[in-house]
Amino acid sequence: VNNMLDDTHSPRDFHSVVKPAIEDMMGREVTFDILFHNSEHQATLFRYGVKKSQQIELIYKHIMPAWKKLFDKKQL
């Protein structure tokens, strides 16, 4: 099955790497953060070893200029 990052990142072997990593996380409490550690970040971390969220990267393009303006005005 091809997933969104298969063209740019090598998927890790499911049985030797991904499945044990998932099993290791079972029952653990995980901090959720919509911008920096959401379910897409976790899924890509398991599959590729890279924490990445294409959805959030699209949002950053719109949020960052607004945040920069507030930061420059010392309002953030």
Image: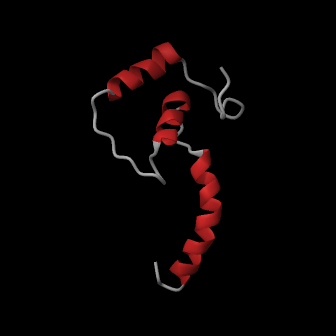
Q: What coloring was used for the rendering?
A: secondary structure
Residue in the image at 38% along x and 47% along y: 32
Would residue 36 be found to the left or right of residue 64 on screen? left
Residue that sits furthest to the right in the current view = 7
Residue in the image at 53% along x and 80% along y: 70
Identify the image quadrant of residue 28.
top left
Question: Compared to 21, does 60 lie above or below?
Answer: below
Would residue 72 be found to the left or right of residue 19 on screen? right
Identify the image quadrant of residue 12.
top right
Identify the image quadrant of residue 7.
top right
Q: In which quarter of the image is the N terminus?
A: top right
Q: Position of residue 22 (x, y in %)?
A: 40, 25
Residue in the image at 48% along x and 54% along y: 35
Would residue 27 be found to the left or right of residue 49 on screen? left
Q: Where is residue 4 in the image (x, y as percent from the top left)?
A: 66, 34
Q: Nearer the viewer, residue 32 or 24?
A: 32
Residue in the image at 34% along x and 29% along y: 25
Q: Where is residue 14 in the image (x, y as percent from the top left)?
A: 51, 17
Q: Could you tell me how many numbered marks the image carries?
A: 0
Residue that sits furthest to the top in the current view = 15
